[in-house]
Image: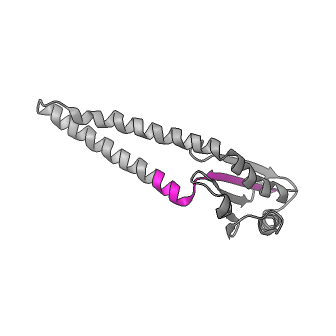
Amino acid sequence: MHDPLRPTFERTVPGIEPEALTERIAAALTASDGGLPHRRAGHHFLVWLPEDRRHMWSPWLHLDVNEPETASPDAELFGRFTPAPSMWTAVMFSYLALGVIAIGGGLFGYCQWIVDESPWGLWLVPATALVALLILLFSRAGQSLAREQMGELTSVVERALP
């Protein structure tokens, strides 16, 4: 599934088992010559930039090292770029609020229409759709501003690959 708010990448890493790849990524992230702040939970990593280089639009990288569906010694690497958790929460809360306003405006406008009043409540539906589109456009602008930082996060992972 394509998610325009969170770019993803998938890669099969041939010839290395998931456990070994996980340890190589952990070593690359903790290296003194270019490691990055991160958290690890099993085969999952959450990687971000140091605070002195972080902006409102700076991405965070979620990495998962998985075993392949087939019985092969390869590892599968799945990465997803997301906004900072606080920013992601704000975006999702905004979409939730817009959805509630759109539904409420649609119901209110329908009720106004039924009782032969001017259904101005229906205007809330396209207005909220416009605001949702603006949030998506701001997200795209933030992704283009963060392209260099996304490359920086990915380069640390690339160093760990055989």
3 relative position to 130: left or right: right
Q: Is residue 131 visible?
A: yes
Measuring 82% from the left and 68% from the top, which residue is drawn there?
A: 31
Measuring 39% from the left and 36% from the top, which residue is drawn there?
A: 129
Display colour scheme: one colour
54 relative position to 90: left or right: right
Picture coordinates of residue 99, whole percent (x, y): 36, 45
Q: Quadrant of residue 140?
A: top right
124 relative position to 72: left or right: left
Measuring 73% from the left and 55% from the top, which residue is drawn there?
A: 153
Q: Nearer the viewer, residue 64 or 136?
A: 136
Image quadrant where one finds the N terminus: top right
Q: Nearer the viewer, residue 125 or 73?
A: 125
Q: State yes or no: residue 162 in magenta.
A: no
Q: Residue furthest front?
A: 52
Vertical position of residue 62 compared to residue 120: above or below: below
Q: Is residue 48 visible?
A: no
Give the magenta part as a residue range.
71-91
Q: Nearer the viewer, residue 44 or 105?
A: 105
Picture coordinates of residue 75, whole percent (x, y): 79, 57
Picture coordinates of residue 25, whole percent (x, y): 79, 63
131 relative position to 139: left or right: left
Q: State yes or no: residue 82 in magenta.
A: yes
Measuring 84% from the left and 65% from the top, which residue is drawn there?
A: 33
How many dots with numbers?
Answer: 0
Q: Nearer the viewer, residue 150 or 10?
A: 150
Image quadrant where one finds the C terminus: bottom right
